Amino acid sequence: MTTVQSADGTTIVYDRSGDGPPLIVVDGALTTRWSGSKTRLAERLATTFSVYVYDRRGRGDSDDTLPYALEREIEDLAAIIAVAGAPVRLYGHSSGACLALEATATLRDKIAGLALYDAPYNDDPAAQPRWQGYLAALTDALANGRRGDAVAAFMTCVGMPPEQIDGVRHSPFWPVAESIAPTLAYDHMGAMKGDGTVPIDRVAGIETPTVVVYGEASPPFMADTAQTLAKTMPSATLRGLDGQTHDVDPAALAPVLVEFFGRD
C-alpha cells in the first residue's frame, strides 16, 4: 500500500504490481481496490504492465475532501500518473469507465490508451424516469444520513429484486457498501453528469486510441452504449466478449487489454 497526495491535499492509496508500461485501473460504483475480481485482473495484467489499482476518494483506505467535484477525481488520477510516469494506459470498469473518459478528455497527452468495459450510459428515453427516480432517492437518503437506503436505491435501480437486497443487507458486503455509499453520488451525478446519457460532444473530441468492450451477456443497453461510443470516438474499436456479464471474468478480459495496450 502506497499513498500520494492529490492537488487538494486528499490522500489517495494505491497498490502497484508488475513491471512494464504503466496501466491504471479505475473502479466503478461501490468498489474498493481489493473488491471483486480486481486482484485476479491485476495479477494477469502485471505480467505485461506496471499495474496501479487505487481507492478512489471516499473509498477503502483513501481519504475524502468535501465538497465533491469531478475535477478533484481527475486530479487524483493525475497525481497517480505523476508517480507512474506519463503517458499511462487507463482501464475503466462500469461508471469507472465514465470517469476514465472524463479524465482522458482533460489530461489528453498523459493518456496513451483507453479501455472501457460496460460504460453504463443509457440513451433510451424510457430509462430516464427510473434513473431520475433513483437520483432523487439517492439524494434524499444521503442528505438524511440513510446510507443503507442509498445503497438499496442503487441496487433497485440496477434491477435487483427486493428479497435479494434484503439478503445482501445481512452479508459481510453491506457494512462496506454503507461506508462508501456517498460515493454513489460521485459516480452517478459526477462522472455520469446526472442524466446518465452518452456525452456525445465530450467523447467525440477524445482522439486517444480506445477499445470499447462490453459483455454480450450484460444488460442489452450496454451493448447499445458501447456501439454509440465506438461510432462517436474518432480512434475507437469495439469488442464484445462472448458469455461475459457486467461482472467480467479477468481470464476473458485481460487478453483483450494486453492485446490492445500492447500495440503501443
Image (spheres, rainbow, N blue to C red):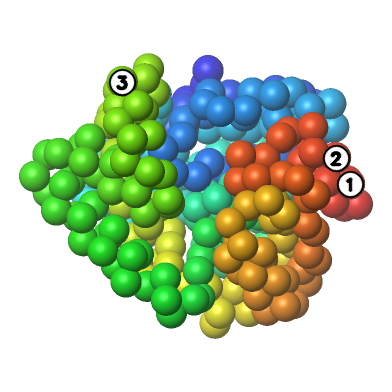
> Would you say 162 lies left or right of 78 here?
left
Where residue 261 sits in the image (x, y, percent)? 82, 48
Specify the amino acid type for callout 1: Glu
Relative depth, front residue between 197 and 149? 149
Ranked by sequence position, the earlier of labels 2 and 3 is 3
Relative depth, front residue between 116 and 46? 116
Where residue 201 sits in the image (x, y, percent)? 54, 82
Where residue 191 sits in the image (x, y, percent)? 43, 59
Rendered view: 170 above or below 25:
above
Specify the amino acid type for callout 3: His
Taking the spot 33% from the left edge, 60% from the top edge, the residue there is 189
Q: What residue is disc 1 on?
A: 259
Marks 1 and 2 in Cβ contact (< 8 Å): yes
In the displayed image of the protein, which residue is found farthest to the front?
Answer: 163
Q: What residue is disc 3 on?
A: 170
Relative depth, front residue between 106 and 99? 99
Q: Residues within 10 Å of mark 1 (few under 14, many from 20)?
A: few
Rendered view: 22 above or below 100:
above
Taking the spot 43% from the left edge, 51% from the top edge, the residue there is 158
